[in-house]
Image (cartoon, grey):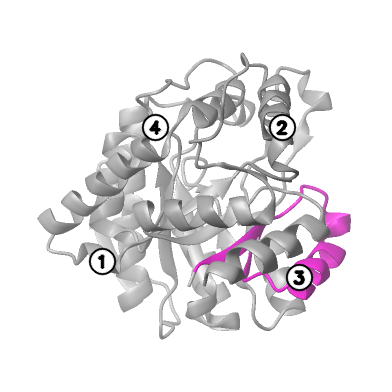
Amino acid sequence: MIKVHALGVAHVAELREQIRLIDGAGLDGFFVTDHLFVSRGRPRREAESGGEPFVRLAVAGALSERLILGSSVVNVGLAHPALAIRSFVELAALFGGERVLAGVGAGWNPEEFTALGLDFPPLASRLDRLEETVALARDLFHHGFADIAGEQFTVQELPLGPISSPPPRLLLGGGSDRLLEIAGRYADVVDLNASSRRLKLGGPQPVFRDTARRFATTVEDLEHSVRRVSTAAVAAGRDPESIEFSILVNAVRFCSAGAVDAVHEGLCREAGIDKQSLEDCPYVFAGPAERMREQLAERAGRLRLRHLILAPTDAEVLARFSHDVVAAIG
């Protein structure tokens, strides 16, 4: 069964109403991002400010008795990772570990580091830190205690309970080979981001390149990512079938079959890229519900999908996609 989650909006004033709509639409979970801000090339005073992810997840958990609470993803490069892990432990103690998807990431926006007076490390160093973080999380989630002297950070006889049963599940997302290998060794859920083979992010404003890379990525590209995760899992002595996969869906557009090309053209224009077909892009669903069901069934089979995270859209689209597309294929 595929679970459907909504990615939250940035405005905290809308949070209570959004949770009510998501819960009422029958979705399975609520996800938050973790950004201090995203400027998109504008002056920082005009930047889109982010929100505190754990406050929002705690509010969502209090407002709904059933929604899965997930992060996509908490940046572990801005502070000692034990602080984020402690918050996941607290969420699990409050609402049950089965409801918590602890998504962590290496950080990709250099502006946020600069604004805090921090150096923005090279990707290799950020991924080293991420790997040490998920190893620490495993110790603390399952044993409540850790003593690790890593190259990126240290914890000395750190007790961090209470232990929940089950513990939170770890989510990692990305498209680079190194990230996928780390995910295969540690993650419970892997969010299949766009393939780094298509386009490198980098630069002062990687957010502009991210959508272009996602729209250029195909289902076949993500099949390669799934194989990479599975190979790393086997090498680490893990059962690859125990790992679930998710994708963050950029766009859901209900329309007639004849209007699909125009929808694709519009999405490319909004992304600032040349017109192209998005027929084989796993992050876009366009057309009537029957067509979307066929797309989802194929992608779920090829990519072993168990989770869909939907980018912000109106409640009617969320409910229709959940009921008429996802629930209809089981």
Q: Is residue 51 visible to us here? A: yes
Residue 299 lies left or right of residue 156; in this view the side is: right
Quadrant assignment, res 228 = top left
Q: Position of residue 31 (x, y in %)?
A: 62, 58
Q: Position of residue 7 (x, y in %)?
A: 66, 54
Residue at 69% x, 23% y: name it.
265
Q: Which residues are magenta?
A: 2-30
* Distance Cα–Cα, label 2 vs label 3: 25 Å
Q: Which numbered circle lies on residue 25?
A: 3
Name the one closer to the observer, 287 or 304: 287
Q: In the rendered image, which residue does mark 1 sit on?
A: 241
Q: Earlier in the sequence, mark 3 or mark 1?
A: 3
Crowd tier of the residue under label 3, counting other residues whose Cα lies within 10 Å: few below 14, some 14–19, many 20 or above: some
Residue 211 drawn in magenta: no
Crowd tier of the residue under label 1, counting other residues whose Cα lies within 10 Å: few below 14, some 14–19, many 20 or above: few
* Distance Cα–Cα, label 2 vs label 1: 36 Å
Q: Earlier in the sequence, mark 2 or mark 1?
A: 1
Q: Which numbered circle lies on residue 263?
A: 2
Q: Kindly identify the amino acid type of the residue bearing the numbered disc 3.
A: Ala
Crowd tier of the residue under label 4, counting other residues whose Cα lies within 10 Å: few below 14, some 14–19, many 20 or above: many
Q: Earlier in the sequence, mark 4 or mark 2?
A: 4
Q: Kindly identify the amino acid type of the residue bearing the numbered disc 4.
A: Ser
Q: Is the C-beta separation of discs 4 and 2 under 8 Å?
A: no
Name the one closer to the observer, 263 or 88: 263
Q: Earlier in the sequence, mark 1 or mark 4?
A: 4
Closer to the observer: label 2 or label 1?
A: 2
Q: Is the C-beta separation of discs 2 and 3 under 8 Å?
A: no
Residue at 48% x, 78% y: name it.
97
Q: In the rendered image, which residue does mark 4 sit on?
A: 195
